[in-house]
Image: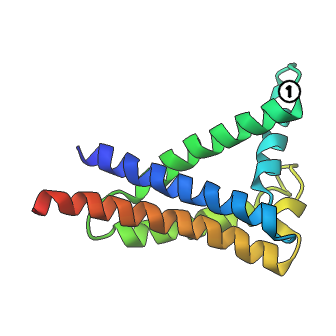
Amino acid sequence: MEAIKSLAGGLAGAIALTVTHETLRRFVSEAPRMDVLGMRAISKIMRKAGKEPPADGDLRTWAMVGDVVSNSLYYSLAGTGKNAWLRGGLLGAGAGAGAVLLPGPLGLGSDPSNRSDSTRAMTVGIYLLGGLVAAAVGSALASDKDE
């Protein structure tokens, strides 16, 4: 049962991250473009496998679905219980730092998450938000058993 609660928290964190990212990218010029990084990653992997990536519309859908699934699993590590908030915060901050520091060395380009100080701050912030939402939901669901 705790695993289901952790997964529910992870899904909530991933949805919070995705909704925040999509809102920011539509209204803020310096917003991070994690969707672009996802599309580049999928294209790069498919080309190395000798396959042609789908057209941009489908590729973006694949990237969004992949982001929600992978972020849900990642944020579910925040779990439940008294240390969920600490784990969620550390997971979020770690993911944000990785999203800023790793795309360039991985050959995905650094501009989508590392374009300016504002872009870097928003990148870390939205991943931190996801971790904290996962912790909040996991903690709230865990407290249900106390009632």
Identify the residue position indicated by label 1 in the image: 53
Comparing 97 with 146, the one in front is: 146
User: Is 89 rendered above or below residue 142?
Assistant: below
Q: How far from the left and from the top, in percent, is residue 128?
A: 57, 69
Amino acid type at image mark 1: Pro
Q: Nearer the viewer, residue 60 or 104?
A: 60
Which quadrant would the N terminus be assigned to in this image? top left
Question: In the image, what residue occupies the spot 64% across and 38% down?
Answer: 65
- Percent x, y of residue 80: 30, 59
Q: Is residue 29 above or below residue 41?
A: below
Task: Specify the farthest residue to the left.
Answer: 147
Rendered location of residue 4, percent (x, y)? 31, 43
Which residue corresponds to the image point at 69% horizontal and 42% vertical from the top-left?
A: 64
In the image, is 126 to the left or to the right of 48? left
Q: Is residue 125 above or below residue 20?
A: below
User: Mark 1: which secondary structure?
Assistant: loop
Q: Residue 3: x percent and y percent?
A: 31, 45
Q: Looking at the image, is 127 positioned above or below residue 44?
A: below
The reply to whether residue 32 is visible in this rendering is no
User: Is residue 65 visible from the viewing direction of this image?
Assistant: yes
Tell me where residue 34 sits by quadrant: bottom right
Image quadrant where one finds the C terminus = bottom left
Residues packed near mark 1 inside 10 Å, few (<14), some (14 to 19) or many (20 plus): some
Task: Answer left or right for 57 relative to 83.
Answer: right
Please report the residue visible at 78 percent of the width from the left and 39 percent of the height from the top.
60
The residue at the far front in this view is: 27
